Structures are given as structure tokens and as C-alpha cells.
């Protein structure tokens, strides 16, 4: 499971020590690197490092880690490498080799999940949120998003889950199976506590499978509660906001009005 606090993809503004290159199948990994791999790390690529070290970028339990092979090829150091000015020389290679590809993968998986669009399809910005029909904070974010959505600048995609109350899954299923899901969602959110949305008494197997997949994806991405909001920052890096964002962060998520 990946645990992100405002996802660790905010790695801009750092110059690469050297252009990282991908590990090829033909490349034989040194024994110390293989030893780390045997413990569950996935070796993604290698990069040049100072002081006779050879850097390897890896993914371990959803996080990026850097491995530094010593000049004798017999030992490996795991962690961040700093220069004399205190500059972190590890973050940029991890960003390029691990987090950027991971961001694209997560975005594609959310795109292929089951969601209800709120806003125009041609909106220049897309925001994903894991949403439970019984979540008052999801409703608060829906209210916050109105200026951007109604101006056609943002489409918010509600990845529906059922987790807060016994009838949450039934309500999500009712929204997903409505003749006009977006209209049904907006009617429900606009009514707030006065919503008359009724849960389906029996959820069709296909819908239940979709809801289960959405909840599993949310859990895998580190979402502990709704709303779990995912967006791309100005550098195209994936970020996550857990809960209702404060005004300054809201502007970062939604962009200019």
C-alpha cells in the first residue's frame, strides 16, 4: 500500500546529477543490488553518482528508494545523498525513474475506474476524487468546486465507493445506474442533508464488482477516508489531498478561476 502525504511527487526544482538510464534486461545486477531486490525491492533504473558510487532507483512498497553501490561493487548504501551545499542529489533521479512513471500509471488506473463526471468533457483540467454518497466532506468539496466546474474549467470525476454507512454502497450503485448519473449526482449533492437519494435494495453483481474495485484502488493508493482527491500540479506531477482542502490548496488543485 502506498501512503502519500500530499504525494511525494513534489520533486521539482532539482537538477539531475546525470541523466538516469533504464535498467535493461541484459544488464546483470551486482550482488548487493540483487540482495536488496530479493527482499522485495523492484529495481527500476540506474544513474551516475559522485565519489565512485553507482546509483540505482528502486520501488519498495510503493515508495521510491535509492541504492548506492560502492566503488568495489561489494556494498550498497540505501538513502539520500547530499552534496557539500546540502543539496539532495537523490530526489531528482527518483522523480524521473520512479515517481513520474508511477504517476502516469496511477492516473491511467483512475481513468479506467468507475466514476461519474461532474463538469464538461472538454474542461482543460481533470480532478479525481473517491466519493461516498454519505460523506459530508465530499459534499463540501462539491460545493467548493462549483465556480470552476460551472465555468467549464475543471471536470471532477467522482470515483464512487461505499464505505461510510451500510447503505453507502447501495446509494453509490443507485447513482451509477441512474439514467443520467451526472444529473443524479448533482441533485444529490445540491440537496445536501435533504437528499432523497435511495439505496438500491439489491446491487447487481456487475455494479458490486465495480464498487469493490474502486474501494480496492482507493485503499491501494493510500486513501483512508473520503474525499481522497488526486490532481496534477503545475509540473504535471500527481498529488493527493486527503479531506476538504483549505482555500490556498483549493486554488492549487483547481487552478485559476
Image (cartoon, rainbow, N blue to C red):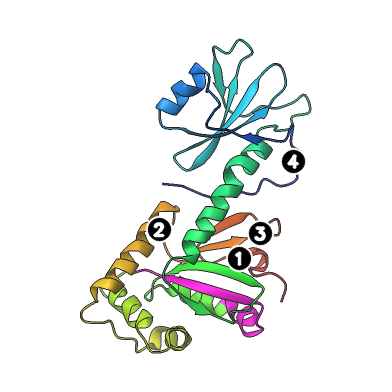
Q: Is residue 201 magenta?
A: no
Q: Is residue 103 above or below residue 144?
A: above
Residue drawn at 32 percent across, 77 percent down: 173
Residue 158 is one of the magenta-drawn residues: yes
108 to 256, vertically: above or below: above
Farthest left residue?
A: 202
Query: Which residue is the site of mark 3?
Result: 233
Give the residue displayed 71% in from the left and 77% down from the top.
257
Q: Position of residue 242 (x, y in %)?
A: 50, 60
Q: CA distance from mark 4 to mark 1?
A: 27 Å
User: In the rendered picture of this protein, how many numbered marks are placed on residues?
Assistant: 4
Q: Is residue 99 left or right of residue 161?
A: right
Q: Are marks 3 and 4 in contact (CB under 8 Å)?
A: no
Magenta region: which residues?
144-161
Q: Which type of secondary structure does the marked residue at label 3 adopt?
A: loop
Taking the spot 64% from the left edge, 78% from the top edge, the residue there is: 148
Residue 40: mark? none
Above or below for 187 versus 163: below
Tell me which label, 4 or 2, sits earlier in the chain: 4
* Residue 8 in sight here: no
Sequence-wise first label, 3 or 2: 2
The residue singled out by tag 4 in the image is 14
Where does residue 110 sit, x and y in percent of width and height?
Answer: 48, 63
Amino acid at each position: 500500500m502506498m501512503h502519500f502525504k500530499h504525494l511525494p511527487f513534489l520533486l521539482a526544482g532539482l537538477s539531475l546529477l546525470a541523466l538516469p538510464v533504464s535498467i535493461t534486461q541484459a544488464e546483470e545486477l551486482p550482488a548487493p543490488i540483487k540482495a536488496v531486490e530479493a527482499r522485495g525491492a523492484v529495481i527500476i533504473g540506474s544513474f551516475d553518482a559522485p565519489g565512485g558510487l553507482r546509483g540505482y532507483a528502486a520501488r519498495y512498497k510503493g515508495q521510491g528508494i535509492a541504492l548506492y553501490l560502492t566503488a568495489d561493487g561489494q556494498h550498497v548504501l540505501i538513502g539520500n545523498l547530499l552534496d557539500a551545499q546540502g543539496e539532495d542529489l537523490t530526489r531528482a533521479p527518483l522523480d524521473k525513474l520512479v515517481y513520474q512513471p508511477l504517476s502516469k500509471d496511477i492516473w491511467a488506473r483512475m481513468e479506467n475506474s468507475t466514476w461519474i463526471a461532474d463538469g464538461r468533457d472538454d474542461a482543460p483540467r481533470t480532478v479525481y476524487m473517491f466519493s461516498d454518497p454519505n460523506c459530508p466532506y465530499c459534499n463540501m468539496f462539491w460545493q467548493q468546486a462549483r465556480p470552476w466546474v460551472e465555468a467549464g474549467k475543471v471536470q471532477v470525476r467522482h470515483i464512487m465507493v461505499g464505505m461510510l454507512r451500510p447503505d453507502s454502497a447501495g446509494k453509490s450503485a443507485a447513482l451509477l445506474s441512474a439514467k443520467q448519473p451526472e444529473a443524479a449526482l448533482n441533485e444529490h449533492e445540491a440537496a445536501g442533508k435533504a437528499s432523497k437519494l435511495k439505496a438500491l435494495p439489491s446491487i447487481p453483481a456487475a455494479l458490486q464488482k465495480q464498487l469493490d474495485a474502486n474501494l480496492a484502488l482507493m485503499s491501494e493508493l493510500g486513501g483512508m477516508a473520503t474525499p481522497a482527491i488526486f490532481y496534477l500540479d503545475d509540473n504535471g506531477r500527481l498529488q493527493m489531498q486527503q479531506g476538504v482542502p483549505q482555500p490556498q490548496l483549493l486554488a492549487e488543485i483547481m487552478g485559476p478561476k
